[in-house]
Image (cartoon, rainbow, N blue to C red):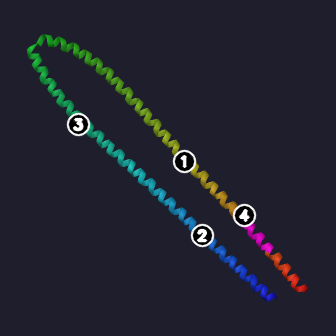
Amino acid sequence: MMEDHHHHMMEDHHHMMEDHHHMMEDHHHMMEDHHHMMEDHHHMMEDHHHHMMEDHHHMMEDHHHMMEDHHHHMMEDHHHMMEDHHHMMEDHHHHMMEDHHHMMEDHHHMMEDHHHMMEEDHHHMMEDHHHMMMDHHHMMEDHHHMMEDHHHMMEEDHHHMMEDHHHMMEEDHHHMMEEDHHHMMRRTTT
Protein backbone atom coordinates (compact mmCIF):
# COMPACT_ATOMS: atom_id res chain seq x y z
CA MET A 1 0.00 0.00 0.00
CA MET A 2 2.74 2.47 0.82
CA GLU A 3 4.48 1.70 -2.46
CA ASP A 4 1.24 2.41 -4.36
CA HIS A 5 0.75 5.57 -2.40
CA HIS A 6 4.30 6.69 -3.07
CA HIS A 7 3.94 5.89 -6.75
CA HIS A 8 0.70 7.88 -6.92
CA MET A 9 2.33 10.86 -5.19
CA MET A 10 5.28 10.75 -7.59
CA GLU A 11 2.93 10.75 -10.58
CA ASP A 12 1.03 13.76 -9.20
CA HIS A 13 4.26 15.58 -8.55
CA HIS A 14 5.46 14.79 -12.06
CA HIS A 15 2.25 16.22 -13.58
CA MET A 16 2.53 19.32 -11.47
CA MET A 17 6.08 19.84 -12.65
CA GLU A 18 4.98 19.41 -16.26
CA ASP A 19 2.22 22.00 -15.76
CA HIS A 20 4.69 24.38 -14.17
CA HIS A 21 7.09 23.88 -17.07
CA HIS A 22 4.34 24.70 -19.59
CA MET A 23 3.44 27.81 -17.64
CA MET A 24 7.05 28.95 -17.76
CA GLU A 25 7.18 28.30 -21.50
CA ASP A 26 4.02 30.39 -22.00
CA HIS A 27 5.53 33.17 -19.92
CA HIS A 28 8.69 33.06 -22.02
CA HIS A 29 6.65 33.34 -25.23
CA MET A 30 4.79 36.31 -23.82
CA MET A 31 8.08 38.04 -23.07
CA GLU A 32 9.27 37.34 -26.62
CA ASP A 33 6.06 38.83 -28.03
CA HIS A 34 6.52 41.93 -25.88
CA HIS A 35 10.08 42.30 -27.11
CA HIS A 36 8.92 42.10 -30.74
CA MET A 37 6.25 44.69 -30.08
CA MET A 38 8.86 47.05 -28.66
CA GLU A 39 11.07 46.49 -31.71
CA ASP A 40 8.14 47.27 -34.02
CA HIS A 41 7.40 50.44 -32.05
CA HIS A 42 11.02 51.52 -32.35
CA HIS A 43 10.98 50.99 -36.12
CA MET A 44 7.74 52.94 -36.41
CA MET A 45 9.31 55.85 -34.56
CA GLU A 46 12.36 55.72 -36.85
CA ASP A 47 10.11 55.78 -39.92
CA HIS A 48 8.10 58.66 -38.46
CA HIS A 49 11.23 60.70 -37.81
CA HIS A 50 12.54 59.95 -41.30
CA HIS A 51 9.27 61.08 -42.90
CA MET A 52 9.26 64.26 -40.85
CA MET A 53 12.80 65.04 -41.98
CA GLU A 54 11.87 64.39 -45.61
CA ASP A 55 8.82 66.63 -45.32
CA HIS A 56 10.92 69.39 -43.82
CA HIS A 57 13.48 69.05 -46.59
CA HIS A 58 10.78 69.29 -49.27
CA MET A 59 9.27 72.32 -47.58
CA MET A 60 12.66 74.04 -47.61
CA GLU A 61 13.12 73.20 -51.28
CA ASP A 62 9.68 74.62 -52.07
CA HIS A 63 10.48 77.77 -50.12
CA HIS A 64 13.74 78.18 -52.00
CA HIS A 65 11.98 77.82 -55.38
CA MET A 66 9.33 80.31 -54.32
CA MET A 67 12.04 82.82 -53.43
CA GLU A 68 13.74 82.28 -56.80
CA ASP A 69 10.43 82.85 -58.61
CA HIS A 70 9.74 85.91 -56.50
CA HIS A 71 13.16 87.38 -57.27
CA HIS A 72 12.71 86.74 -60.97
CA HIS A 73 9.30 88.47 -61.00
CA MET A 74 10.69 91.39 -59.06
CA MET A 75 13.49 91.79 -61.59
CA GLU A 76 11.03 91.73 -64.47
CA ASP A 77 8.76 94.23 -62.72
CA HIS A 78 11.73 96.44 -62.00
CA HIS A 79 12.82 96.34 -65.63
CA HIS A 80 9.34 97.38 -66.85
CA MET A 81 9.13 100.12 -64.30
CA MET A 82 12.49 101.48 -65.44
CA GLU A 83 11.36 101.55 -69.05
CA ASP A 84 8.18 103.43 -68.10
CA HIS A 85 10.13 105.76 -65.95
CA HIS A 86 12.52 106.58 -68.76
CA HIS A 87 9.63 107.56 -71.10
CA MET A 88 8.01 109.66 -68.44
CA MET A 89 11.28 111.45 -67.83
CA GLU A 90 11.64 112.25 -71.48
CA ASP A 91 8.10 113.74 -71.62
CA HIS A 92 7.94 115.63 -68.32
CA HIS A 93 11.39 115.87 -66.93
CA HIS A 94 11.06 118.69 -64.42
CA HIS A 95 7.61 117.76 -63.16
CA MET A 96 8.53 114.14 -62.86
CA MET A 97 11.68 114.96 -60.96
CA GLU A 98 9.72 116.79 -58.29
CA ASP A 99 7.08 114.07 -58.12
CA HIS A 100 9.71 111.43 -58.11
CA HIS A 101 11.51 113.04 -55.24
CA HIS A 102 8.33 113.09 -53.13
CA MET A 103 7.47 109.58 -54.09
CA MET A 104 10.93 108.36 -53.15
CA GLU A 105 10.71 109.99 -49.76
CA ASP A 106 7.31 108.36 -49.17
CA HIS A 107 8.58 105.09 -50.51
CA HIS A 108 11.64 105.24 -48.29
CA HIS A 109 9.48 105.80 -45.19
CA MET A 110 7.15 103.02 -46.21
CA MET A 111 10.09 100.68 -46.72
CA GLU A 112 11.53 101.58 -43.34
CA ASP A 113 8.15 100.83 -41.71
CA HIS A 114 7.80 97.67 -43.72
CA HIS A 115 11.29 96.50 -42.83
CA HIS A 116 10.68 97.15 -39.16
CA MET A 117 7.40 95.22 -39.27
CA MET A 118 9.08 92.32 -41.04
CA GLU A 119 11.82 92.20 -38.43
CA GLU A 120 9.24 92.15 -35.62
CA ASP A 121 7.21 89.45 -37.38
CA HIS A 122 10.29 87.35 -37.90
CA HIS A 123 11.33 87.78 -34.29
CA HIS A 124 7.89 86.69 -33.06
CA MET A 125 7.91 83.71 -35.38
CA MET A 126 11.29 82.65 -34.06
CA GLU A 127 10.07 83.05 -30.47
CA ASP A 128 6.99 80.93 -31.26
CA HIS A 129 9.19 78.32 -32.89
CA HIS A 130 11.49 78.26 -29.89
CA HIS A 131 8.52 77.81 -27.52
CA MET A 132 7.17 75.01 -29.66
CA MET A 133 10.53 73.26 -29.54
CA MET A 134 10.68 73.68 -25.77
CA ASP A 135 7.15 72.25 -25.43
CA HIS A 136 8.18 69.32 -27.58
CA HIS A 137 11.25 68.75 -25.44
CA HIS A 138 9.15 68.79 -22.26
CA MET A 139 6.66 66.38 -23.79
CA MET A 140 9.50 64.00 -24.60
CA GLU A 141 10.82 64.29 -21.05
CA ASP A 142 7.34 63.56 -19.66
CA HIS A 143 7.04 60.58 -21.95
CA HIS A 144 10.40 59.27 -20.78
CA HIS A 145 9.36 59.60 -17.11
CA MET A 146 6.08 57.84 -17.82
CA MET A 147 7.97 54.96 -19.41
CA GLU A 148 10.29 54.74 -16.40
CA ASP A 149 7.28 54.68 -14.04
CA HIS A 150 5.62 52.04 -16.19
CA HIS A 151 8.74 49.87 -16.13
CA HIS A 152 9.04 50.21 -12.35
CA MET A 153 5.37 49.26 -11.87
CA MET A 154 5.81 46.20 -14.07
CA GLU A 155 8.83 45.11 -12.06
CA GLU A 156 6.91 45.50 -8.78
CA ASP A 157 3.90 43.62 -10.16
CA HIS A 158 6.14 40.79 -11.32
CA HIS A 159 7.83 40.61 -7.93
CA HIS A 160 4.46 40.39 -6.15
CA MET A 161 3.25 37.74 -8.55
CA MET A 162 6.35 35.66 -7.86
CA GLU A 163 5.85 36.03 -4.10
CA ASP A 164 2.20 34.96 -4.45
CA HIS A 165 3.26 32.03 -6.60
CA HIS A 166 5.84 30.99 -4.03
CA HIS A 167 3.29 31.13 -1.18
CA MET A 168 0.78 29.12 -3.19
CA MET A 169 3.40 26.45 -3.86
CA GLU A 170 4.32 26.31 -0.17
CA GLU A 171 0.66 26.03 0.88
CA ASP A 172 -0.08 23.35 -1.73
CA HIS A 173 2.97 21.37 -0.70
CA HIS A 174 2.11 21.66 2.99
CA HIS A 175 -1.49 20.63 2.36
CA MET A 176 -0.40 17.61 0.32
CA MET A 177 2.01 16.55 3.04
CA GLU A 178 -0.76 16.79 5.65
CA GLU A 179 -3.12 14.73 3.50
CA ASP A 180 -0.41 12.15 2.85
CA HIS A 181 0.34 11.91 6.53
CA HIS A 182 -3.35 11.61 7.33
CA HIS A 183 -3.80 8.76 4.82
CA MET A 184 -0.70 7.03 6.05
CA MET A 185 -1.98 7.21 9.62
CA ARG A 186 -5.37 5.80 8.65
CA ARG A 187 -3.75 2.93 6.77
CA THR A 188 -1.47 2.01 9.63
CA THR A 189 -4.39 1.94 12.11
CA THR A 190 -6.66 -0.26 9.92
Q: Secondary structure at mark 3?
A: helix
Q: In this image, 188 relative to 35: left or right? A: right
Residue 164: numbered disc:
4
Q: Secondary structure at mark 4?
A: helix
Image quadrant where residue 7 sits = bottom right
Q: Amino acid at mark 3?
A: Asp
Q: Amino acid at mark 1?
A: His
Q: Which residues are magenta?
A: 163-175
Q: CA distance from mark 1 to mark 3?
A: 43 Å
Q: Secondary structure at mark 2?
A: helix
> Which callout, 3 or 4, points to the residue nearer the camera?
4
Q: Residue at x 76, y 82 (%)?
A: 9
Q: Tell me which label, 2 or 4, sits earlier in the chain.
A: 2
Q: Residue at x 47, y 59 (%)?
A: 40
State the residue lying farthest toward the right. 189
Residue 26: numbered disc:
2
Look at the image and tell me in which quarter the C terminus lies.
Answer: bottom right
**129 inside magenta stretch:** no
> Which callout, 1 or 2, points to the residue nearer the camera?
2
State the residue lying farthest toward the front. 190
Q: Name the residue carrying label 1.
A: 143
Q: In this image, 104 relative to 88: left or right? A: right
Residue 122: x, y in percent?
A: 37, 30
